[in-house]
Amino acid sequence: MKNIVVITGASSGFGELFALQLDAKLKSIDEYWLVARSTDKMQEIAKAMSTPCRILSYDLTKEQAVKDVIKAVEREVDNCYDELSIKMLINSAGYGKLGEFVYADDKDVSGMIDLNIRALTCLTKGLLPYMGNNSRIINIASAAAFLPQPEFAEYASTKAYVLSFSRALNSELQKYGISVLAVCPGPASTNFFTIAEGNGKMPWYKKMFMVDPKKVVDKAIHDSINKYEVSVYSFPMKGLRIISKLIPHSLMLRMMNRK
């Protein structure tokens, strides 16, 4: 049996950290498949890992790219002398842009939907046939999924989808021994906000709650091993999740809209 791990968004941020931390923790994986646009960055990451890596340079905002990744797995199954099993699929690719929706660039709006929702969903659907008992899916959602977010409307909405999709899928796949975890980090020290602030400025209160992304990933791996359905790092984000269930969203939106 050839056991592989597929990681999207693997050239930086959470995707890179998952690759490095899993490589250090798991001894039963034969190969990591790293998927992202930047070949050079993935090659650097692969050099730092002890397990062999396969580099797949694709822009997953493109529908054909998602199909090509699935086809690459199908070819490997056909050519593999032994059975192939995807032990972990980590959907880490995603991005967001701050700013009012009315001023948002059309390409950014469609890009967030294509990457955060369509690519994640279609890739999961295409790779599920190669997953089995004790396999894991980890989807990177966000604490933004807990409630609507003015000036972050598109991104928060896509992550609300990821959270809902992951929880429902986790329930569906239990009978196959496959668990699905939605990771809901708050602000973390990655390059996310460098991209996000292209159209707006990150609210000051988000900077107050910035956390170490390594700790987010470490908790996510722990929670996935224990077959939790949602992973939330840091007390402020756990508090936000509770508050978002207790206080009507209409009231919270009025509070957020105060200047």
Image (spheres, rainbow, N blue to C red):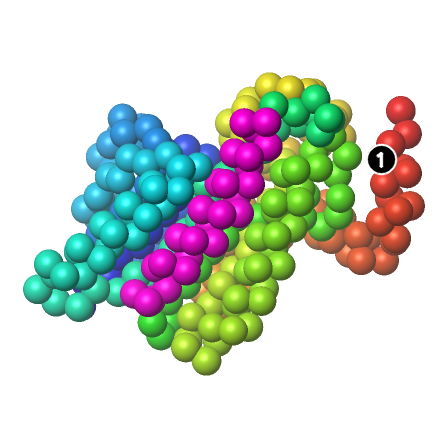
Question: Measured along the vertical axis of the image, is residue 190 above or below residue 4?
Answer: above
Instruction: Give residue 228's position: percent from left, percent from top.
Output: 55, 66
As drawn, the residue found furthest toward the bottom would be: 175
As drawn, the residue found furthest toward the left would be: 81
Does the magenta portion include 128?
Answer: yes
- All told, the count of numbered labels is 1
> 128 or 170: nearer the eye?
128
Instruction: Give residue 147's position: percent from left, percent from top.
Output: 75, 47
The answer, for residue 215, to whether it is visible in the render is no
Q: Is residue 258 left or right of residue 195?
A: right
Q: Main secondary structure of the magenta part?
A: helix
Question: Measured along the vertical axis of the image, is residue 109 above or below residue 75?
Answer: above
Name which quarter of the figure residue 124 lies in. bottom left
Question: Measured along the vertical axis of the image, is residue 81 above or below residue 142?
Answer: below
Instruction: Give residue 217's position: percent from left, percent from top.
Output: 48, 47
| Residue at screen point 44% across, 37% down | 61
| Quadrant of image for the N terminus | bottom left
**Residue wearing tag 1:** 256
> 19 or 132: nearer the eye?
132
User: Which residues are drawn in magenta?
Assistant: 106-131
The three-letter code of the residue at mark 1 reads Met
